[in-house]
Structures are given as C-alpha cells and as structure tokens.
Amino acid sequence: MTTTLTRPALTAADRCDRCGAAAQVRAILPSGGELLFCGHHAREHNSKLRELAAELQQG
C-alpha cells in the first residue's frame, strides 16, 4: 500500500525560503522535505531541483 500525502495549497502567508518573498512554487524532495520558492528563485534553481527528482507544484 502506498500512502500519498496531500499538501495544502500555498497561501499568502507562505514565503520563499531564499528571500522571504511570496512563495509561488513548492518543491517536494524525494526525501520528503519541501522547499518554497518565489518565481525568481524557482527559475534559478529549476535545473538542480529536476536533477534531484523534486516534484514541483505551482501555488
């Protein structure tokens, strides 16, 4: 049996882990951790996140 966790949608209170701007993207890492990014930092780190097989969710 596989359990999938459902994460809530991003809200105005969610902030980018790099700069504190409003979060627009949630990156869920294979280890289960997550990072929140503004649009700018999501684009900046997109290739590395894909390399790590992170699941990207638009907020």
Image (spheres, rainbow, N blue to C red):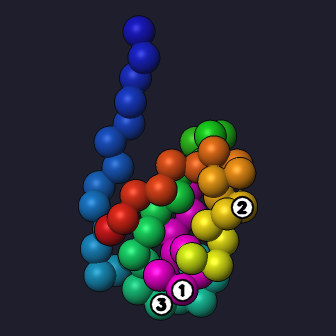
| Amino acid, disc 3 | Ala
Position of the N terminus, as image quadrant, is top left
Q: Where in the figure is residue 25, as x and y percent of width and height? A: 44, 69
Tell me the mark number nearer the camera, choosing from 3 and 1. Answer: 1
| Residue receiving disc 2 | 48
Q: Where in the figure is residue 57, as x and y percent of width and height? A: 40, 58
Q: Which comes before the other along the chain, label 3 or label 1?
A: 3
Mark pair 3, 2: CA separation? 21 Å
Mark pair 3, 1: CA separation? 10 Å
Look at the numbered disc 2 and give the secondary structure of its residue.
helix
**Residue visible at 32% across and 42% down in the picture:** 6
Q: Which comes before the other along the chain, label 1 or label 2?
A: 1
Contact (Cβ within 8 Å) of mark 1 with mark 2: no
| Residue receiving disc 1 | 40
Mark pair 1, 2: CA separation? 14 Å
Q: Which comes before the other along the chain, label 3 or label 2?
A: 3
Look at the numbered disc 1 and give the secondary structure of its residue.
helix
Contact (Cβ within 8 Å) of mark 3 with mark 1: yes
| Amino acid, disc 2 | Lys
Within 10 Å of the Cα at label 1, are there few (<14), some (14-19), or many (20+) other Cα atoms?
A: some
Asked whether residue 40 is drawn in magenta, I would say: yes
Instruction: Give, as a single range, the part of the protein colored magenta.
Output: 33-42
| Residue receiving disc 3 | 21
Q: Where in the figure is residue 50, as x and y percent of width and height? A: 63, 54
Position of the C terminus, as image quadrant, is bottom left
